[in-house]
Structures are given as C-alpha cells and as structure tokens.
C-alpha cells in the first residue's frame, strides 16, 4: 500500500469560551471569506474545495475558545486529497476536547466528518442521560463501551474511566 507524502502544518493557537457540536454536511465548491485560522492555513497550502467545510467546522467546534491545531495536507495534490485537522480545544464550561476534522474532496464539493473526544469527571450513565439523551442505545461493545446513535450518520461511544467517562462523538456526512 502506498501513502501520499504529507507534511503536518501547525496552525498555532487562538486564545479563548464551549465547544458546540456541529452537524456535518456536504458542501459545494465556493470561495468563502475565511476567518478561521484552520481554513486560512489550508488555503495557504493549496486547498480550495474543502475550505468552506474547514471554515464551518472550525467555527462550530472552536468558537472563541483557546485552541491548538495541526493540519495534514497532501504535499503533491492538496486540493485532490483528504485534509485532516487535529485540534485541542480548551473551554471554560467543559473539559478540554480533542477534535479531528476530515474533509475529502468529492465531485459536488467536499464531504466532511468529525470526531469530538472528551473525558468527563462524571460516570457514563449520567453523560448518556444528559448530553446524549436524544440518542438511541445500540448496546455494549467489548470493554464496557456503550454505543449510541442518532440517525444513520451520528454515533457516540461512551467508555468508562476509573474516575469518569470518555465520550467520542463521530459524525459523517451523507
């Protein structure tokens, strides 16, 4: 299996406010006005088709919170290959979040996906009843991980920790 050459691009940090949880959707090709450092860094590396997705998800996930990010972009074909951004988002209202944004060029624009990971100081039952109360219970996975879904493209995994719960929210566009 061959892998394309990719150079991580540090995005730096932005100082601070909670992480909202956006809804991913396929975006058409546009030339958006960029305010998000994440999208600006991708644009500087040659990404065009997925800028709207990176701008939208960056704004939704980061908001006005302090963050640090790294973007992986294919060196040879930046606009033809998926872009991945890994973020650490510090909030005042909830635990620090790790977010992974994937944006893949498709014929009609860009198909996004994101994963949002947080360690909560509360047990998983409480987290499922408060943060994921509209999700449907799908069962227990090995290791005591609870799987919840909301529709066909949104799921949450809740993993018990010795002193809390790790939540992993995964959303993929149709």
Image (spheres, helix red, strand yellow):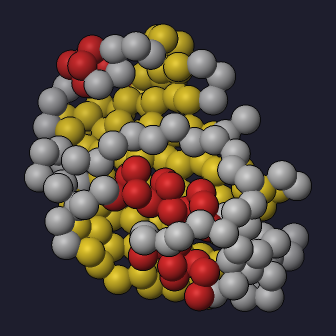
Quadrant assignment, res 130: top left
For this rendering, which residue is in front, 96 or 61? 61
For this rendering, which residue is in front, 128 or 19? 19
For the N terminus, give its image quadrant: bottom right
When the figure is inspected, residue 37 is found, relative to residue 158, above or below; the finding is below
Query: Which residue is drawn at the image coordinates 76% and 75% (left, top)?
Result: 79
User: In the rendered picture of this protein, how many numbered marks are placed on residues?
Assistant: 0
Q: Is residue 19 left or right of residue 171?
A: left
Q: Position of residue 70 (x, y in %)?
A: 46, 76
Query: Which residue is drawn at the image coordinates 44% and 60% (left, top)?
Result: 58
Quadrant assignment, res 14: bottom left
When the figure is inspected, residue 49 is found, relative to residue 151, above or below; the finding is below
Query: Which residue is drawn at the image coordinates 73% and 67% (left, top)?
Result: 49
Q: Is residue 35 left or right of residue 130?
A: right
Q: Is residue 88 left or right of residue 81?
A: left
Query: Which residue is drawn at the image coordinates 65% and 59% (left, top)?
Result: 103
Q: Position of residue 84 (x, y in %)?
A: 59, 66
Residue 17 visible in the displayed image: yes
């Amino acid at each position: 299996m061959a892998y394309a050459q990719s150079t991580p691009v540090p995005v730096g940090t932005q100082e601070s406010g909670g992480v909202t949880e956006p809804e991913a959707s396929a975006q058409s090709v546009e030339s958006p006005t960029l305010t998000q450092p994440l999208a600006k860094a991708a644009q500087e590396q040659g990404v065009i088709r997925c800028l709207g997705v990176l701008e939208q998800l960056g704004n939704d996930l980061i908001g006005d919170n302090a963050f640090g990010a790294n973007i992986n972009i294919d060196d040879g074909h930046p606009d033809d290959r998926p872009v991945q951004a890994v973020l650490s988002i510090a909030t005042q209202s909830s635990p620090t979040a790790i977010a992974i944004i994937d944006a893949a060029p498709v014929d009609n624009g860009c198909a996004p996906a994101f994963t949002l990971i947080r360690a909560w100081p509360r047990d998983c039952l409480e987290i499922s009843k408060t943060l994921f109360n509209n999700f449907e219970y799908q069962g227990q996975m090995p290791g005591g991980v609870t799987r919840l879904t909301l529709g066909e493209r949104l799921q949450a995994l809740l993993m018990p920790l010795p002193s809390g719960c790790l939540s992993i929210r995964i959303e993929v566009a149709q």
